[in-house]
Image (cartoon, helix red, strand yellow):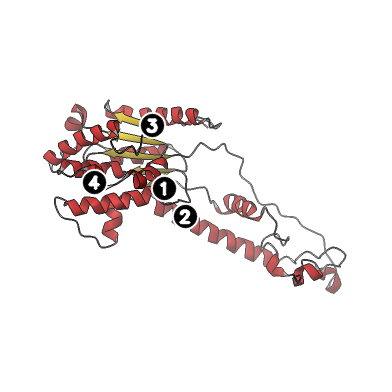
Amino acid sequence: MPSSPAEDEGIDDPRLHHPASGQPVGPNTVQDCFAGARNEAGLDHYRVRKYRAWYRHVTLSMLAHVFLAVTGRASRPFPAPAGRKSRVTDDCPQGPRVVVKSPRQPPQEREPRMRVGISGTHGTGKTTLAGALCARLPGHVMADEPYYLLEEEGYEFGFPPSLEDYRALLACSVQSLSSPSLLPGIVFDRTPLDYLAYLAAIGADPADEAGPAALRPAFASLDLLVITVITPETENVLPAAEMPGLRSEMNDALVELAHGDPLNAWEDIPVLELDGPLDGRLGAVLAALEQARRLAGRAVPPYGHK
């Protein structure tokens, strides 16, 4: 195989150098780029809950890092290859060398990032709980709910939703959980289990709507499945929900599906049913995540502690 010009002459092509340091590209370039973006452009300084907001923050931070790298590189010459004189010494005398070090943040311990699915009938505080989790767990965001994803694509839902509406929501939820994500810490407000329960509540057979082959990979991506159920406190404290009959039937179907797992799709995933006080939900989920972490043997700091 013929050698490249870089191999013939030594790496002296600016295209093969890191834009910020001027050093040849090596195996740790990607890690160095992310480390620089964290230190210089706040790559990991996000306090957002939605995936899209996180994506926009990361994109802007990387663009800012590129700008700093390119503008900083423009004022420094590329290093001379071994055995050659620097271009600076060939053309002009060197003055005193000034080294400017970028301020670096003190290293921080990182808490584990996990994927949590929250299922429950409407009017049981799912979204509030998901937001509280994202606020408590650094680096976690809330995934867009399938209903809003489909609405943005132009899907028109009936009221109440029809059988076809729930089927579309189920397919969207399965795809959302199964798709590879750039971010490990995600809280899902609704999972495929919700739509299977709604389908059961309106008379459909969940076994006819989705098979284990599609559901297992989706649920396998979760570290914890949380179920919010109707309790006396949800009825007295939370605002009255629409379609109370459907809400109650979905709640019963959800509990039966979650614990019975007739589709053998989430049998290996820890399931936490929240039937206690509303103000104790967040603590119960954090404790369950800690237990799941220990069972998985992850040597990381516990949740809620720095």
- The residue shown at (84%, 72%) is 92
Q: Residue furthest top?
A: 276
Lower sequence index among marks 2 and 1? 1
Q: Which residue is mark 1?
A: 48
Query: What type is the residue that disc 3 sits on?
Result: Pro
Q: CA distance from mark 2 to mark 3?
A: 32 Å
Q: Which residue is mark 2?
A: 57
Q: CA distance from mark 4 to mark 2?
A: 41 Å
The answer to whether one can see residue 238 in this image is: no
Q: Position of residue 33 (x, y in %)?
A: 62, 55
* Label 4: few (<14), some (14–19) or many (≥20) C-alpha neighbours in 10 Å: few
Q: Which residue is mark 3?
A: 270
Q: Position of residue 127 (x, y in %)?
A: 30, 42
Q: Which residue is mark 4?
A: 208
Q: CA distance from mark 2 to mark 1?
A: 9 Å
Q: CA distance from mark 1 to mark 4?
A: 38 Å
Q: CA distance from mark 3 to mark 4?
A: 25 Å
Circle 3 SS class: loop
Query: What type is the residue that disc 4 sits on?
Result: Asp
Q: Is residue 8 above or below residue 266?
A: below
Lower sequence index among marks 3 and 4? 4
Asked if the residue at tag 2 contacts the one at tag 4, i.e. Cβ–Cβ closer than 8 Å, the answer is: no
Q: CA distance from mark 3 to mark 1?
A: 26 Å
The answer to whether one can see residue 247 in this image is: yes
Q: Residue furthest bottom?
A: 91
Q: Position of residue 8 (x, y in %)?
A: 80, 70
